[in-house]
Amino acid sequence: MTALQHLKLFNASNLLVIDGMQEMVSHLPKLTHLEDLQVYNMVNGMDEDSVKGLCEIISSQPHLTTLRLPFNDFTSESIEMLCESISKLDGLTHLDLSRSAFDEASMNALGKVVSNLPILYLELYDITWKSSGFEAFVAQLDDWCYLKSLNLSHYETISEENTTELGSELSKLTSLILLDIRCCEPDDYFILLEPLKSLPLQVLFLNAPPDCEDTETSLPLQVRCVS
């Protein structure tokens, strides 16, 4: 199996204990042709030793182009550790760190990763925003002009103030063709549309009031209202 290029590891029940993590660390580096690694709900993102083990695995796979690590509940400190290893993946184009926590320091660390690597597809849904994390995220958008896909979906909505702040910077993403902003209140629907007019969007997901129908706008796409 050393020629394996795609590997998805998914756990529907208990997280790996440290022994299981060490077992992964001992075997996965043998997959020297791996390009796509997906680890779903397996790592205890709040445990430093488990995260260090995952960092070892990532560092052993220099050919990765896709790295999906959702539902591992990484803390802000864990994200900073991961970013050190991810930053060495020179060919990475797809990154998923969904259901993690971000504060200002960890978002700045991710910002450097996304800016310095050829990442085109970024998944950040169900993010827990810690102190100044959201503000730091918005500040990164100026340097992410080559992103093609960004997912910010969340079951909890952000404030009108944060929506306005986000809307003011979305126009910086001049290569974006897919955007999921189902993290905003339905009543803030129109705050977001004006900044998007200059973007080459083909797919847009957003929340809208219950009485909203699919809407033709001056955007070069049909907006799908999700209520």
Image (tube, rainbow, N blue to C red):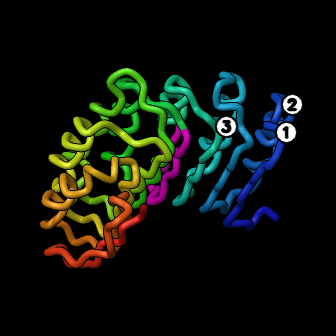
Question: Which is nearer the N-term, disc 1 or disc 3?
Answer: 1
Q: Position of residue 187 (x, y in %)?
A: 28, 51
- Of residue 70 and residue 120, the one placed in the foreground of this image is 70
Residue of label 2: 19
In magenta stretch: residue 38: no
Tag 1, which secondary structure? helix
3 and 2 marks in contact (CB < 8 Å)? no
Residue at the spot x=41%, y=64% of the render?
226
Q: Position of residue 167 (x, y in %)?
A: 20, 49
Q: Position of residue 91 (x, y in %)?
A: 46, 57
Q: Position of residue 135 (x, y in %)?
A: 27, 31
Residue of label 1: 23
2 and 1 marks in contact (CB < 8 Å)? yes
> Taking the image as drawn, is residue 225 in sight?
yes
Q: Which mark is residue 168?
A: none
Residue 98 left/right relative to 208: right
Q: Residues within 10 Å of mark 3 (few under 14, many from 20)?
A: many
Residue segment shown in magenta: 85-99
Residue at the spot x=34%, y=66% of the render?
211
Tag 2, which secondary structure? helix
Q: Amino acid at mark 3?
A: Leu
Calculate the distance from the C-alpha at mark 3 to the C-alpha at mark 2.
Answer: 13 Å
Q: Amino acid at mark 2?
A: Asp
Q: Which mark is residue 54?
A: 3
Residue 147 left/right relative to 191: right
Residue at the spot x=71%, y=60% of the render?
7
Q: Amino acid at mark 1?
A: Glu
Calculate the distance from the C-alpha at mark 2 to the C-alpha at mark 1.
Answer: 6 Å
- Of residue 109 and residue 170, the one placed in the foreground of this image is 170
Tag 3, which secondary structure? helix
Q: Main secondary structure of the magenta part?
A: loop
1 and 3 marks in contact (CB < 8 Å)? no
